[in-house]
Image: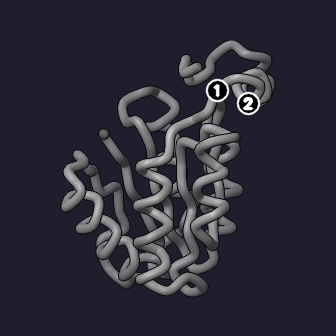
Amino acid sequence: MKIAIGSDHGGFELKEKILSLAIGLGHEVQDMGCYSLCSVDYPMQAYKVANAVASGQYDRGILICGTGIGMSITANRVPFVRAALCHDIFTARMSREHNDSNILCIGGRVTGPGLAEEIVKTWLKTTFKGGRHKRRVCMIDQNGKKGSGQE
C-alpha cells in the first residue's frame, strides 16, 4: 500500500516511529514533512497529505500533530478525504470498516507511542465492509461522485 505521512513539530517524534513501523510492515511510505522539531504550521502538511490521497497518488495517509484535531479538521476540508481522528484501536477499526477512512489522524502529545503503533497496525489492516456503509460513504463523497469502489 502507498501511504503519505506528515506531521507538525508536535507530532514529529511520533511520525518518525510510525514511518519506521509502516515501512517495516512492507508499505511504500512517503514522508511529506515536517522534518524536525522546529515549529511549523500544521495545515501545510495536512493539505500535502490530503491532496495526495484525494488525487489517488497515495492509497492512504497518516497525519500527526499535538492533538490530531488540527490535522483532522484541515484534511477533511479536501474533497474525497475521510480523515478520522483516532485515540484507540476500536475507533481506528470502525473508521475503516464503517467509514472507509483514508487518512488516520493521531495526537502525538495525547497518544503514547505503543498505543499509536497498535492504532496504525489496526487501521492499515482493516478493510471497508461496504454494503450499507458504502451508501453512506458515497453520501459523504459529494453524493456518490467518487467512492472506494469496494463492496
Q: Amino acid at mark 1?
A: Gly
Q: Amino acid at mark 2?
A: His
Q: Residue 144 bears which disc, if any?
A: none
Q: Is residue 19 above or below residue 97?
A: below
Tags 2 and 1 touching, CB below 8 Å = yes
Pointer 2: what residue? Answer: 133
Residue at 36%, 30% (x, y): give it.
57
Residue at 27%, 66% (x, y): give it.
21
Q: Quadrant of the N terminus?
A: top left
Most extreme residue toward the top is 145
Answer few, some or many: residues within 10 Å of disc 1's Cα (few below 14, many 20 plus, some between 14 and 19): some
Name the residue nearer the viewer: 86 or 67.
86
Name the residue nearer the viewer: 148 or 90.
90
Name the residue nearer the viewer: 120 or 129.
129
Q: Residue 130 bears which disc, if any?
A: 1
Secondary structure under badge 2? helix
**C-alpha distance separating marks 2 and 1:** 5 Å
Left or right placement of residue 87 versus residue 119 in this view: right
Left or right placement of residue 3 versus residue 118 in this view: left
Residue at 73%, 16% (x, y): give it.
144
Res. 104 image quadrant: bottom right
Q: Is residue 42 above or below residue 100?
A: below
Name the residue nearer the viewer: 136 or 140.
136
Secondary structure under badge 1? loop
